[in-house]
Image (cartoon, rainbow, N blue to C red):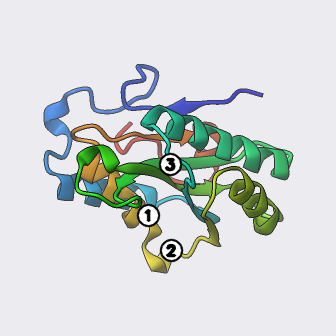
């Protein structure tokens, strides 16, 4: 089973190579990303906040491991989109106190127990929310906010198993 996360820097992904065509402000990036993500039939919205201090690379590995955990429960490939938000969960004014956590949208999980996945995530990482995706609640734009807020500078986000996401509608990149 192939495990794939796609980043904008991945040359195999068809996207506008001319960065002058990309949104140039955080708000424009968030709106474009939210519009794009809302075209998919997501089934879950998840947030994982780590109980221990996590570096950005550790949070990126945790995002991958989150999807692997969901796939273990589903016994099939799932698709998803993830973004890492850095926030002051631990408090303090020092920028070094920013702690990452993960937001994710997940598809191809019909019939999978959210509670079983939640229990594993909570045990491993800490505070976890896994909810049914409701397109009327704006989760696509919420997760896109963190891409827009940080992607133009240092944000981390990715697509988990793009081929599964494509089965849930939408296109990997508008105009591709």
On-image quarter of the C terminus: top left
Please say whether residue 102 is visible from this viewpoint: yes
Q: Which residue is mark 2?
A: 135
Mark 2 and 1 residues: CB-CB less than 8 Å, in contact? yes
Residue 82: image tag: 3
Element type at marker 1?
helix
Element type at marker 3?
strand
Residue placed at 40% from the left, 61% from the top? 89
Residue 109 left/right relative to 32 = right
Q: Residues within 10 Å of mark 3 (few under 14, many from 20)?
A: many
Label 3 vs 2, first from the N-terminus: 3
Element type at marker 2?
helix
Whether residue 54 is situated above or below residue 119 in the rendered picture:
above
Residue placed at 45% from the left, 37% from the top? 55
Give 69 or 42, whichever is nearer the viewer: 69
Q: Which residue is mark 1?
A: 140
Residue 71: image tag: none
Label 3 vs 1, first from the N-terminus: 3
Q: Residue furthest top?
A: 11
Q: Residues within 10 Å of mark 2 (few under 14, many from 20)?
A: some
- Residue 153, horizontal then vertical, whole percent: 22, 38
Q: Residue furthest right?
A: 75
Residue 22 left/right relative to 131 = left
Residue 121 left/right relative to 26 = right
Whether residue 67 is situated above or below residue 136 in the rendered picture:
above
Please say whether residue 161 is visible from this viewpoint: no
Whether residue 56 is situated above or below residue 23 in the rendered picture:
above
All told, the count of numbered labels is 3
Give 40 or 123, whichever is nearer the viewer: 123
Label 2 vs 1, first from the N-terminus: 2
């Amino acid at each position: 089973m192939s495990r794939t996360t796609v980043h904008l820097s991945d040359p195999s992904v068809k996207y506008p190579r001319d960065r002058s065509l990309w949104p140039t402000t955080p708000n424009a990036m968030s709106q474009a990303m939210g519009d794009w993500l809302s075209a998919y039939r997501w089934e879950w919205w998840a947030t994982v906040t780590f109980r221990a201090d996590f570096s950005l690379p550790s949070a990126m590995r945790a995002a991958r491991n989150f999807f692997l955990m969901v796939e273990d429960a589903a016994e099939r490939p799932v698709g998803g989109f993830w973004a890492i938000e850095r926030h002051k969960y631990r408090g303090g004014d020092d920028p070094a106190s920013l702690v990452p956590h993960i937001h994710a949208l997940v598809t191809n999980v019909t019939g999978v127990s959210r509670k079983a996945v939640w229990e594993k995530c909570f045990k491993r990482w800490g505070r976890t929310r896994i909810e049914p995706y409701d397109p009327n609640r704006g989760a696509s734009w919420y997760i896109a906010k963190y891409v827009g807020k940080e992607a133009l500078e240092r944000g981390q986000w990715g697509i988990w198993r793009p081929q599964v996401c494509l089965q849930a509608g939408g296109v990997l990149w508008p105009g591709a």
